[in-house]
Amino acid sequence: TESKHRRRGGDLKTRGTELGSAVTGSPLTATTGKKSIVLSSETRKELAKQAKVTKEERRARLDERHKYLIARLADGIGLSEQQVEEAIISDDKFQLIEQFFASSGLKKLLFFYQDVLQQKLNASMRSDGSTNSSIQKKLFITMGSTENFTGTCAFFLRTSDKVITASNVSQEVNFGAFDCTNGNILQGLEFFLSQIMIPALKSQQNWGAVKEGLKNSQIQDFLYSVDKFVGTLSSSRQNIEDKIQLTKVDIDIYISNLQNPSDYITAG
């Protein structure tokens, strides 16, 4: 009896893993230890059905706050709002959006849009244990620390601890994006700061409690420090790009005929 209970528990755990993969659009395989098991067509159909239900439940929960995020993402990345919506409700980190909206919730919400290796839905296991897969562009929610960043980062930042509502989302949430195609993060950050943030700061008229605005010495010091940081960033990027790369030399032709010490001396 005990062994039967353990077996059922293992089946339930595997089933949970399978369902999670189906909901998030991940490869339809169950992983146990180091082995990957391709799911049967019946199981795939069942998981696809459950995944569809989960997605529709999430879609029904979308309100004006979500639509605001979706519109900003679509404009910033260059996708349709329908594509962004589908990506969001299919994401296994969907709950982070609710945590971002909550009172004293997450201060940032990050999205990556980049090439990822995705397994085809009708993939079958090859003799070597691998499956058919392809590189595709994908928009997904991220914490920013678990995936390599090689494409575009879109982000939302909160300006207070207030609960985010449909009426205040446009005032309380800021949106930005920067392109780091091919992993060129320094160049992407430099462009974002120099071409977007600094011009926006220098044209800003309202600085809150600082009535003098841009004439205030503290504001001027702040803008100077940001300018200086961008200059340092640019210099660092140029130094990295101008690094010396040694040419690889094929030395086989030089050492293949070395037979005795005198040959080594001559070669030297």
Image: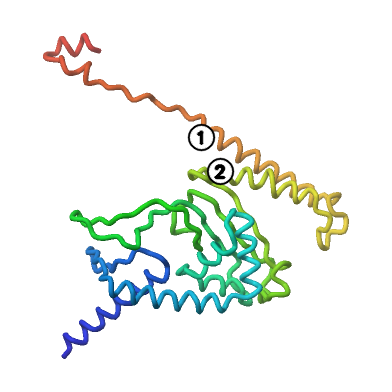
Residue 122: image x %, image y %? Answer: 31, 62
Question: If the image is split into quadrants, where does the C terminus sit?
Answer: top left
Q: Which residue is located at x 15 percent, y 9 percent?
A: 262
How far is mark 1 from mark 2, CA to CA?
10 Å
Position of 150 relative to 210 (above/below): above
Position of 190 relative to 28 (above/below): above
Position of 77 relative to 168 (above/below): above
Marks 1 and 2 close (CB-CB < 8 Å): yes
Q: Amino acid at mark 2?
A: Leu
Q: Which residue is located at x 16 percent, y 11 percent?
A: 263
Q: Which residue is located at x 47 percent, y 58 percent?
A: 145
Q: Residue reaching furthest bottom? A: 1
Q: Which residue is mark 2?
A: 186
Q: State which tag comes first along the sequence, 1 or 2.
A: 2
Q: Which residue is mark 1?
A: 240
Q: Residue reaching furthest left? A: 259
Answer few, some or many: residues within 10 Å of disc 2's Cα (few below 14, many 20 plus, some between 14 and 19): some
Residue 5: image x %, image y %? Answer: 21, 87
Residue 71: image x %, image y %? Answer: 64, 63
